[in-house]
Image (cartoon, helix red, strand yellow):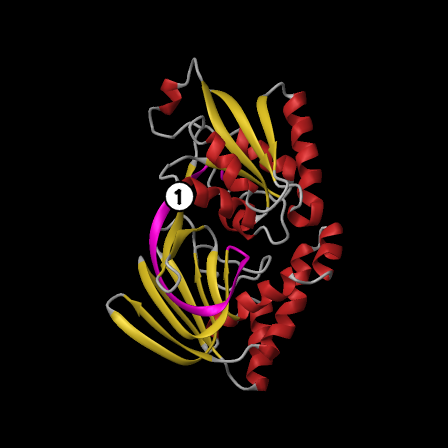
Amino acid sequence: MNFHYHILINPAAGSGNAAKAAEKIIQLLDDGDYTYTPYYTEQPGDEREIVGRLVDLLSPWSETCEKDHVDNSFHLLIVIGGDGTLHEVVNQIYALDRQLPVSYIPAGSGNDFARGIGLSREPEKAFEQITSALKPQPINVFHYEEKIREEQGVILNNVGIGLDALIVATTNASTSKKVLNKYHLGSASYAIYLVKAIFTQKTFPILVELNGQTLSFERTFLCTTTNIPYFGGGVAIAPMADPKKDTIDLVVVEKPNLPAILRFLIQLLRKKHTDNKHYKHFTSSKIRIVSVVPQHGQADGENMGERSFDMNFSTATQYIWYADKRTEK
């Protein structure tokens, strides 16, 4: 199959790390005599504008695609940036009512999506996974509808209300994140603010509907609806989550007393937290979450603001073009 790669680059992602990653990838493209066209974002929202211009040119995927494109180019979009950049791209494709495969070179601060699907976080290795793939991988994502503000879209990683969203809001507003990104330690910035958030996040009530049940939690500390195990740059909050299965995982943690908080933090860092009595896990293909008391929210690592939520989640599929080395024999 002949490819024409359309490279969407957010040079600001990862406090400039994406610009460096893009230089490496473009050098590989030139050295390999690949056909490609680069597109650079200059300000927030440019991702959607670029996708809008490319959407009629990009190739859809079907099982007959390889035969259809033997003599014609397959136009594939590769995103170089962070999880937030990829989120914007996929949501614009969804808003335009298209189903298109995309690929990804992770170059943000957390890069949790790459961790979750088995895509290397080293640009050169990720490029090799993309160019060696014969077809895209179907990845389970989820669609959301937020009734209060009448929003909807696609989530690749997770939506969090409470603790993880407070971490995102605090970290994204910090200067330390830029410094740590400079030394490829972006994930450490989330860890720093995780400790602070654990002591400042207040409890709040939520209502959950799933699997024919209605559940209420009065002292919620963290509420994360997730597609992958990770949030905050590699914290495995839901180690049982798997983007290849067609369900959504929900984690609810109710706030214990101070000694129990410290115990939970230690267990979380050691990946033993699922045994904690305050940790609740659910799985379903459809979930509704209502949080009346305003809280911080985050979607794919992007701050949603402090507000009330009434969100419905359902499963969907997004094709990501890469070779999953974990499943190859």
- Residue 315 falls within the magenta-colored stretch: yes
Residue that mark 1 sits on = 95
Left or right: residue 153 versus residue 2 is left
Q: Residue furthest top?
A: 71
Front residue of 309/245: it is 309
- Look at the numbered disc 1 and give the secondary structure of its residue: helix
Give how far across and how far down residue 211 sits, in percent. Answer: 26, 65
Left or right: residue 289 versus residue 253 is left
Left or right: residue 209 versus residue 293 is left
Give how far across and how far down residue 277 sits, in percent. Answer: 45, 79
In the rendered image, is residue 325 in sight?
no
Front residue of 272/280: it is 280
Q: Residues within 10 Å of mark 1 (few under 14, many from 20)?
A: some
Q: Quadrant of residue 74?
A: top left
Taking 132 as reference, is 317 above or below it? below
* Number of numbered callouts drawn: 1
Stretch in magenta:
300-324
Give how far across and how far down residue 138 sits, in percent. Answer: 39, 41
In the rendered image, is residue 179 in sight?
yes
Taking 62 as reference, is 97 above or below it? below
**Residue in the image at 62% along x and 41% along y:** 10
- Residue 166 falls within the magenta-colored stretch: no
Q: Given the image, on which type of amino acid does mark 1 rest?
A: Ala
The rendered magenta stretch, by its main secondary structure, is classed as strand
**Residue in the image at 59% along x and 37% along y:** 126
Give how far across and how far down residue 13 sits, in percent. Answer: 64, 47
Taking 324 as reference, is 224 above or below it? below
**Residue in the image at 59% along x and 33% along y:** 127
Taking 53 as reference, is 111 above or below it? below
